[in-house]
């Protein structure tokens, strides 16, 4: 069997995307550890139930962002991952951290990037009157939520949607596309080339 892709996941909260990645049971992927910046993150439980090592690097215990990021990096690297995935990780990472994981750091964002970067994406999508919304998995680069997109999922915005109903529709798609993007990476089919993502050597166009 092909060698498994060693992966470390970072979470901050509920962890439903982490659960989707665990439940995918991708034979090409080995989740070596889950690290949370919040001791109370519900998602830690999914890792523990699956027998995956967990750690907490509590950002409130650090004097500066860079101190936090350095410790986080040391902890991540102790597991020697080839891919690091942000799964609802709600901290902005320093350019040094991002550069260290260039081409092997994924994030999932609940919007059709480049639309609605940042927070409260569902609320803002509803307020703007768009007919379509969705989620994006992207490579992380120094600009917040601006890295090149690997895969997106689109959902309709319905007339009677509120934030909750729209978020739930998007979340179902997140749970589908994140394991898919990870699988492509594990198959060695994905590459970050400057601002472009290549799948099987071909640039992905949005
Ligand atoms: C997900 O919707 C994810 O896309 C979003 O946080 C949620 C985490 O849910 N991430 C961001 O907004 C990143 N800027 P989860 O903890 O259940 O996976």
Image: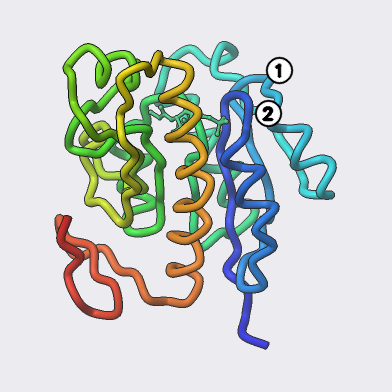
Viewer-side residue, 30 vs 26? 26
For label 1, the crowd category at 10 Å Cα-Cα, with few meaning under 14, some 14 to 19 and many 20 or more, is few
Residue 46 x/y as whole percent: 75, 38
Question: Would you say residue 119 is visible in this rendering?
Answer: no
Compare marks 2 and 1 and give the one earlier in the sequence. Answer: 1
- Please rate how many residues cluster around mark 2, counting C-alpha atoms within 10 Å: few if below 14, some from 14 to 19, many from 20: some
Image height check: is 22 above or below 47?
below
| Residue 158 seen in this snapshot | yes
Per the rendering, the mark at residue 1 is none
Q: Is residue 33 left or right of residue 12?
A: right
Residue at the disc numbered 1: 40
> Which quarter shows the C terminus?
bottom left
Question: In the rendered view, would you say 83 is above or below 141?
Answer: below
Q: Residue at 26% across / 51% down in the picture?
A: 149
Q: Secondary structure at mark 2?
A: strand
Measured in 3D between alpha carbons, the distance from the residue under mark 2 to the one under mark 1, in whole angstroms, is 9 Å
Residue in view at x 61 percent, y 35 percent: 16
Quadrant housing residue 122: top left
Where residue 9 sits: x, y (%)?
58, 45
Left or right for 137, reference 79: left
Q: Residue at x 78, y 33 (%)?
A: 45
Which quadrant, please, contains the N terminus? bottom right
Between residue 44 and residue 123, name the one nearer to us: 123
Q: Residue at x 69, y 62 (%)?
A: 25
Considering the numbered disc 1 on the image, is that residue within a helix, a strand or a loop? loop
Q: Residue furthest bottom?
A: 1
- The residue identified by callout 2 is 56
Residue 157 at what x, y percent from top left?
30, 28
- Asked if disc 1 is less than 8 Å from ligand 1, the answer is no
């Amino acid at each position: 069997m092909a060698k498994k892709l060693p992966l470390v996941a970072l979470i901050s909260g509920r962890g439903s995307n982490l659960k989707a990645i665990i439940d995918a049971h991708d034979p090409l992927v080995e989740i070596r550890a889950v690290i949370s910046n919040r001791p109370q993150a519900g998602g830690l439980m999914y890792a523990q139930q699956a027998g995956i090592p967990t750690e907490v690097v509590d950002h409130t215990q650090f004097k500066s962002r860079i101190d936090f990021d350095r410790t986080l990096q040391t902890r991540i690297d102790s597991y020697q991952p080839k891919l690091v995935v942000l799964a609802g990780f709600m901290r902005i990472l320093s350019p040094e951290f991002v550069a260290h994981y260039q081409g092997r750091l994924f994030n999932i964002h609940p919007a059709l990037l480049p639309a609605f970067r940042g927070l409260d994406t569902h609320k803002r999508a509803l307020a703007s009157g768009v007919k379509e919304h969705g989620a994006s998995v992207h490579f992380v680069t120094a600009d917040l939520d601006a890295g090149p997109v690997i895969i997106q999922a689109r959902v309709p915005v319905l007339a009677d949607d509120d934030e909750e109903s729209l978020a739930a529709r998007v979340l179902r798609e997140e749970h589908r596309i994140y394991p898919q993007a990870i699988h492509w990476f594990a198959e060695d089919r994905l590459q970050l080339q400057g601002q472009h993502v290549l799948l099987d050597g071909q640039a992905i166009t949005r």
